[in-house]
Amino acid sequence: MIAIQILNGLVYGSLLMIVASGLVLIYGLRRVVNFAHGSLFMLGAYIAYAASLQFGFGGGLLAAVAALAAVGFCLDRFGFRLLQDRDPLTVMLVTFGLLLVFEDVVQSIWGKQSYSLAAPEALQGTVDLFGSPFPVYRLAIVAVGALVAACLVGWLRYSRIGLFIRGASTDPVTTAMQGVNTDRLSGGVVAVGAALAGLAGVVSGPFLSLSPTMGSDILIDSFVVVVIGGLGSFAGAFVAAMILGQVQALGAVYLPDLAALLPFALMTAVLIWRPSGLSGSRV
Amino acid sequence: MSAIITATALEDTQVKRNPGVMRLCAMAAAAVAVGLTVNMSVTSNGLMSLLTQATIYAVFALGLGFLLKQNGMVSFGHALFFGMAGYLVGAAVTLTGWPVGMVVVLTVAAIGMFAFGLALVIVRVPGIAFGMLTLAIGQSFYVLVSKSRGFTGGADGMNINFPAQVFGMELASFQNPSSMFLICWLVLVALVLLLALLLRTGFGPLTEAIRENEERARFIGFRTLLPRAAVFAVSAMVTAVGGVLSALYTGFVSPESLHWSVSGTVLIMVVLGGSRTLWGPAVGAVVYYLFRDFVGEHTTHWMSIFGVSLIAVIVLWPAGIAGGVMRAATSLQRAAARRLA
């Protein structure tokens, strides 16, 4: 029983990790807290749903990731880049305005009812784990999460662009002075961040259901992750996502009345202990 | 920029002065007169209840705007204090049977203390993460209340059975739009006046200095944590007053009043009205309601419309409606002064 709950926590933690790493990427380059990130997640899920009716799950996945990368690029080119000299608060409120627009667009196209995205045939069964059946699809989510984490770590640690991104996350101005075109870099990075949100949306489609509120639910949890992990820190976000996943899954079983308050309690405890998050890097 | 301004002699109109106490009282009296005029001239019941609701939310927006003005921080979780005030009043009235006046005072005080304690933890977080934090905190209480069982009624909300006499007045006068509008308006004006008086003390310049540069404020020897937490607590208490008014008016409180979209909506009002003055957010609330009523008749896409207007206002016109009014007033004053000279 407890092993299954820990696995469930791992599943949700993987989703959170994908979403939160997108937030961290965007924050690192543009110093923007993207309130529209949950809407991008939702948009990804709905686009995949629409495309999967025609082309199946794989087609939906590709369509959603490509569409979201394009949205992310435009967001940077026509939004963050033009506003980069403004107060961070201003840009944060702009992304909040975008959230309202995206939610309205989704509601006016697909309405308020919820949909569910069919998992690909190969992943539809269950396997026996620890004596009880467990959906294969959930294991696939964990695998996707691990793959994304590995790719991100490899990309950021060992590639030239990764070096630039790490540099720009530490200090955008100095990095630009060394000859890195941070504007071009940001376009790509925000596109990747948005695509990750879209990917998480698609992957969560068969696991959670598609509804206009799915964006704000995940947004809030991933904010908790980013705050616990420390703004702008990937390692912090990975660890915090896994912890929060476990807290949510175990809390729902063992402390059902207080489950809603657990993330908040965890966050408060971490912030009293380390005001700038687990990673402790000051930003 | 600022060095240039301080180097040359400032023109009289450039010097920012706090308005005198007499002038504040005169403005408050004028605002009361405006409320009375509106109350007498509006005959349509629909418009009246719209204005009452707008005034209740104007109190909420006043609280949220105060935080942004004095602390430079945006809260996405202020609905917590709004809804919690309603629940606390409802619970105390139902369970204890204490006089409503005492319950209301205790509620606002309790929320002030809760907010102060919370603020001691969360205002230490760098500004930009503060919005994320408040969002998460507010939302966790929303989920807690909407899933709770027992007398708070869970997702269905809670009816509050107020006694027939509230503050020595008939309960009916709180639930009739026309008289309630006047009550809310008077409360709003009184709160703006109180906050303006508070900002005339050392508290105003101190918190503004901390907002502009916390580190420098510390360098010159001020403790910064307590004033910032105090701003948060005051802002939460003003918001709680709004929640109490809403509970009195409707006799009902639902978890929806805790939802973060309420905080977001009020934030739109604050930005629309302009947060550089105390009264801007209140004007924003009234404009929001009138505009939404007008737009709502023509389209259901008001969320998009408000999203786009929010972006447009914040990018093109960051000082909001109040900023525009102030600029117009200053240029009128200058023109008048030039004609006299």
Image: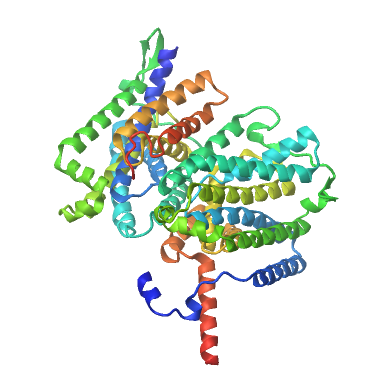
Q: Is residue B135 visible?
A: no
The N terminus of chain A appears in which quarter of the rendering?
Answer: top left
Q: Residue at x 55, y 87 (%)?
A: B336
Which quarter of the figure has residue B62? bottom right
The C terminus of chain A appears in which quarter of the rendering?
Answer: top left
Residue A143 shown left or right of residue A6 in the figure: left
Which of these two is toward me, B28 or A114?
Answer: B28
Which of these two is toward me, B255 or B299?
Answer: B255
Q: Is residue A61 visible?
A: yes
Residue A117 spot, x, y in % from top left: 40, 31
Which of these two is toward me, B152 or B209?
Answer: B209
Q: Residue at x 28, y 55 (%)?
A: A77
Residue A168 shown left or right of residue A263 in the figure: left
Give above or below for A104 relative to A281.
below
Q: How many marks can you see? A: 0
Residue A176 spot, x, y in % from top left: 20, 54
Residue farthest to the front, as pictured? B221
Q: Residue at x 24, y 35 (%)?
A: A152
Residue farthest to the top, as pictured? A131
Give above or below for B318 relative to A3.
below
Residue B245 spot, x, y in % from top left: 70, 50
Give above or below for A181 relative to A16.
below
- Colouring of the image: rainbow
